[in-house]
Image (cartoon, grey):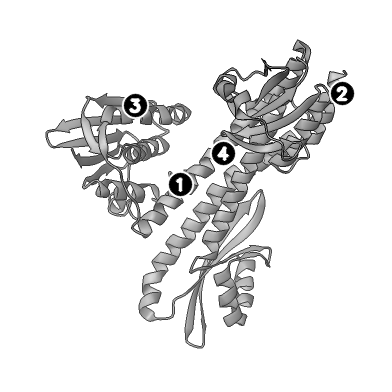
Amino acid sequence: MDVQQLLSKYMLEISKVEDEKTLYTALSEIIKRVLDFQVLNILSSGNVIYLEPNGVSISENYYSDYISWVEERLHPTFLPFEDLYVGLVPIFKGKKSLAIAVLLTTSEPTPEIIDYLQLIAYLSGITLENLRLFKMVDDSRKYFETVLNVSNDGILVFKDTEIEFMNLKAKQILEESGSLLEKIREEVEHESGFFEFEKESTFFSIAIKKVEFFGEERFLVSLRNITTEKEIQKLKEVDKIKTNFIANISHELRTPLAAIKAYTETMLNMPMTLEEIQEFLTIIQTQSERLENLLNDLLDFSQIESNTMKIVKENTDICKIVENVVKSAKQMASDYNVDIMVDCKNVTVNCDPGRMEQVLLNLVTNAIKFSDKSKEERYAKIEAIDEDDQIRLMVSDNGIGIPGDKLDKIFDKFYRVDNDLTYSIPGTGLGLAIVREIVQLHKGTIQVESEEGKGSIFTVIIPK
């Protein structure tokens, strides 16, 4: 058996797979080259998702008692059963089992074959994780396309002066006002930021924003009908906010997607060591989590808008929540050179632990992101103070602070304080709006004190 040749052939085959089924077919074929089996099943989350031969399944009595053990060991195992051997080969990545191949064979494999199965299971696990990652990214793309297409605003993306993307509302507006498209093209050429368009007593506001997608220049255009004078005055500010929101979303999506695309293309097209693969996959996972967090913010915002956000209260140790927040923010704090300090005494509060953790984590990560780089010592402090029938949660920092004239706006949806210090800091402007909604659902209040250059204190008061 020329192991090197078989491995090279298998790596070439799995580099071309487009879905899980073709991956399992390739895995089945490569196992046949080294081990004569009668039946092979692939299990995922306890369910049979692939059968070889087709339609032939292995009874759970052969393997059900050993699944957990094999998932923990992450090593191929063959067990005698009457005149057969039952093989369980975990398909894994890192310390995580993604699926298990169960097969029946009449002969016990040699240690060399078991080592070979371990290696191809690992290679299959890397590919399987990538396939699932690609699916998640594709689902996220479809989600955002759907969001854009149900928007009441027309949204277009121009490359030079040609339309590259247009949502349904933009198509409707341009069909009704044909001359508007030529006007937009003219303004895009001059890189205009905002203008109004009138035709037959119908008014439109148009905002144009130059952005970069994967290193190429684009122009993001939003269209809105603002026919009445009252609507014109009201929607000028709304249009600015919406435009900034779209620009922020574009930036938030572009950065992780560009990273995911670049690293996956490199992995698919270049020979790499195991350490390099692990490093690339770690970066891909981090960027995927960033996309997931953005999606969660949008889903929370959707619940706020539809008044469907719910909380489930239970007696909760507030210090346990604080501990989880510190763990979640530890790496980010290290990256920004910020010390996280905690002052918490054990107290039980009747709250939704997941949502309360979301509140504190948002406040703490904001304190970290908006830390003052000019200061040698930077901190974010979490305090939990027991006050008889209520609890006071305080998150303070010595960061850049918030201008006094902005304090009454920071909890508004999509609002971001824009200045030279905050320009490069990522965000959608939804975080504090979501925080306020969660606090109010707990019958609580949230307050902020801040001074530019000195820092901020956010105080959340929740009844026990």
Q: Of the numbered discs in the image, which one, if any, rests on residue 287? A: 4
Q: Which residue is mark 3?
A: 323
Q: Reading the chain from its start, which is encountered first: label 3 or label 4? A: 4
Residue at the extreme left:
388
- Asked if 419 appears above or below 65 in the picture, the reply is below
Task: Indicate the position of residue 250 as horizontal and vertical percent values.
Answer: 55, 53
Q: Residue at x 33, y 58 (%)?
A: 307
Tag 1: amino acid? Asn
- The kind of residue tagged 3 is Glu
Earlier along the polypeptide chain: callout 3 or callout 1?
1
Measured in 3D between alpha carbons, the distance from the residue under mark 3 to the one under mark 4, in whole angstroms, is: 24 Å
With respect to residue 452, does 160 lie above or below?
A: below
Residue type, numbered disc 4: Gln
Q: CA distance from mark 4 to mark 2?
A: 35 Å
User: Where the N terminus falls, by quadrant?
Assistant: top right
Q: Tell me the number on the disc at residue 5.
A: 2
Q: Position of residue 296 (x, y in %)?
A: 45, 46
Q: CA distance from mark 2 to mark 1?
A: 45 Å
- Secondary-structure class at tag 4: helix
Whichever of labels 2 and 3 marks the residue nearer the N terminus, that label is 2
Number of residue marks: 4
Disc 4 or disc 2, which is closer to the eye? 2
Of residue 430 and residue 228, the one placed in the foreground of this image is: 430
Identity of the amino acid at label 2?
A: Gln
Mark with earlier residue (2, 1): 2
Would you say the residues marked 2 and 1 are in contact, meaning their CB atoms lie under 8 Å apart?
no
Residue at x-position 22% and y-position 34%: 349
Tell which circle, 4 or 2, labels the residue nearer the N-terminal end. 2
| Contact (Cβ within 8 Å) of mark 3 with mark 4 | no
Of marks 1 and 4, which one's residue comes earlier in the chain? 4
